[in-house]
Image (cartoon, grey):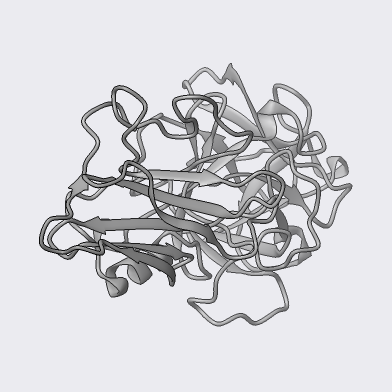
Amino acid sequence: MGTEGSCRTPRLELTPNKSSLHVRFSGNWCENVGINEVGDGLLLDKWYHLAYTISDSEKRLDFYIDGEWVGFDCIPDVRTGKVVFNDGPLYIGRSFHKGFDGDVSNVRYFNWRLCAEEVKEDSLNTRITYGSKVALVHEPTGKYLSTKGIKYDCGRFGQHMVVGTGRKIDLNNDVFTVIEANGTSVSVGSPLLFNNIVGFKHQATGGILHSHGLNFGSTPLMRHQQVTLRQGRNGDDDWLIRRYNSAISKDDSVYVCNNDIICLIHFKSDKPALYSHPILFGDGSQEVSCHGNGNDDNNKWRIELIDDSKL
């Protein structure tokens, strides 16, 4: 939005009640033009990939939802009509007057107009799929889920302890592959959806992210349920992936995307959630456990998509 609140290049609004998208820009003949309403309205508790492209040389605005072209507007007089571009701050999540109650994630601004194929590719590249390489970052502390190769001296079969390590990713030790739930079959490349059961395989050791009941041993600091890396598979390796602080939705089309804030519920035991806290071991690593119902700040994790070419 422009410095005086009149420039609408780019501007994206939600209509009242219906939450349809109102896609606007400013021209030298009118400060408020564009697409009045796009689609039937956005749904609550669902993420969308939104792409706004505009070109003065091509005299048009295009808009995409989840990589699909859904609307456009053209400058009627191509000889004299021009786009008036923003010369002031670009407000994200709020306008000159007010904002909205919701989350915005993974905003990218390009200084060229993406074509339809590039928008589609950008949409797909933000999704987490089975086979994706990911890292899990504890949001309150910024520590990456990892291991230092230390084994629990109590618990099941001396499994590797899972801990939180540095605030900068270690590509050799902090990377997991998203895998299917135990006993199921899912094609690599299939999108991961919220409220599904999933597993995580540690890239460096091949161990599967695992937990087990307190009767098999507890964590040394907080006496919570242990989280380990286990060789082989069983039902203790299954995790319900849920958007953080959100009730389970009946909408099975909600994709898990890069940098989403999630919680992971251990599915087989008494449904505790993946947990960590700022209390450190002597080596500076951070205890990780299963504890709480998923709504505590310490159950809050960010899932980060890792580019395979960097590994």
Q: Is residue 109 above or below residue 189?
A: above
Where is the C terminus found, in terms of image quarters? bottom left
Q: Taking the image as drawn, is residue 203 in sight?
A: no
Residue 282 placement (x, y as % from top left)? 52, 17
Report the residue at 48% width, 62% height from top: 127
Residue 155 placement (x, y as % from top left)? 75, 44
Q: Taking the image as drawn, is residue 287 in sight?
A: yes
Report the residue at 21% width, 44% height from top: 28
Residue 265 placement (x, y as % from top left)? 75, 48
Where is the N terminus found, in terms of image quarters? top left
Report the residue at 26% width, 56% height from top: 54
Residue 46 placement (x, y as % from top left)? 65, 54
Report the residue at 30% width, 58% height from top: 53
Q: Indicate left or right for 41 with 207 as reference.
A: right
Q: Is residue 85 above or below residue 306?
A: above
Q: Indicate left or right for 186 with 224 as reference.
A: left
User: Considering depth in this image, is 41 or 130 the residue closer to the camera?
Assistant: 41
User: Considering depth in this image, is 56 or 152 the residue closer to the camera?
Assistant: 56
The number of callouts visible is 0
Q: Indicate left or right for 143 with 238 as reference.
A: left
